[in-house]
Image (cartoon, rainbow, N blue to C red):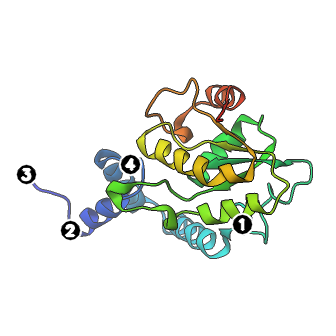
Amino acid sequence: MAGFPKKIENLITEISKLPGIGPKSAERIALHIISMDDYKVDSLVNAIKDARKNLHLCPICFNLTDKEVCDICSDSKRDHSTICVVEEVSDLYAIEKSGEYRGVYHVLHGRIDPMNHISVEDLKIKELVERVAKGGVKEVIIATNPNFNGDITSLYLQKVLKPFGVKISRIATGLPKGTEIDFVDSVTLIMAIKDRKEIK
Ligand SMILES: [Zn+2]
């Protein structure tokens, strides 16, 4: 049985490193890319390069943006006294898609993960504490994933935010244990935010 030529194997290997892509999908995508017209490949590559070059993290919430401050942080119609803390930018957009949340966000860019040596210093936790310390924040909604790492991150956040006397709540009521927020449908997600429980 003949395998793929080495160059295709390399491409499959690279694509399979992307999140959510299994070996079979990686193979299909690789073969598809190879069969694409040159100009389509160029526009794909350019879109990747352009996005990487022109996007940076919002200095307030650490969402991705191509402006100085992201659209959410610069929107005066949003409730800047409520901060929803998420692990990843994809979680922020999952909540945004529900269209019901009117507060602002804080993206941690990960979760505390002792197995993979990801600790507090690797995340935007210090920045969150500084944000809350500045004042004007009434509630912090912790929307880390309802799994082991998300829960220990939540516990840590509760501990460091408690001295500021803000209301701290945790979503995930009604979310099945172990689910990832960016895979949950909008209705379930918005119910989870509405049913959030204050942590005393
Ligand atoms: Zn922002």
Q: Residue furthest right?
A: 76
- Amino acid carrying mark 1 in the image: Cys
Q: Earlier in the sequence, mark 1 or mark 2?
A: 2
Q: Which of the two discs, 4 and 1, sits closer to the camera?
A: 1
Q: Which residue is mark 2?
A: 6
Q: Earlier in the sequence, mark 4 or mark 2?
A: 2
Which of 168/60 is in front? 168
Q: Which residue is mark 3?
A: 1
Q: Which residue is mark 4?
A: 21
- Amino acid carrying mark 4 in the image: Ile
Q: Residue furthest top?
A: 174
Asked if labels 1 and 4 touch by Cβ distance under 8 angstroms, the answer is: no
Q: Earlier in the sequence, mark 4 or mark 3?
A: 3
Question: Residue 17: percent from the left, percent from the top?
Answer: 35, 59
Q: Is residue 112 left or right of residue 142?
A: left
Cα–Cα gap, marks 1 and 3: 51 Å
Q: Quadrant of the C terminus?
A: top right
- Amino acid carrying mark 3 in the image: Met
Cβ of disc 1 within 8 Å of ligand 1? Answer: yes
Residue at 48%, 63% (x, y): give it: 37
Element type at mark 2: helix
Element type at mark 3: loop
- Can residue 64 be spotted in the picture? no
Q: Is residue 88 left or right of residue 13?
A: right
Answer above or below: position of 139 versus 76: above
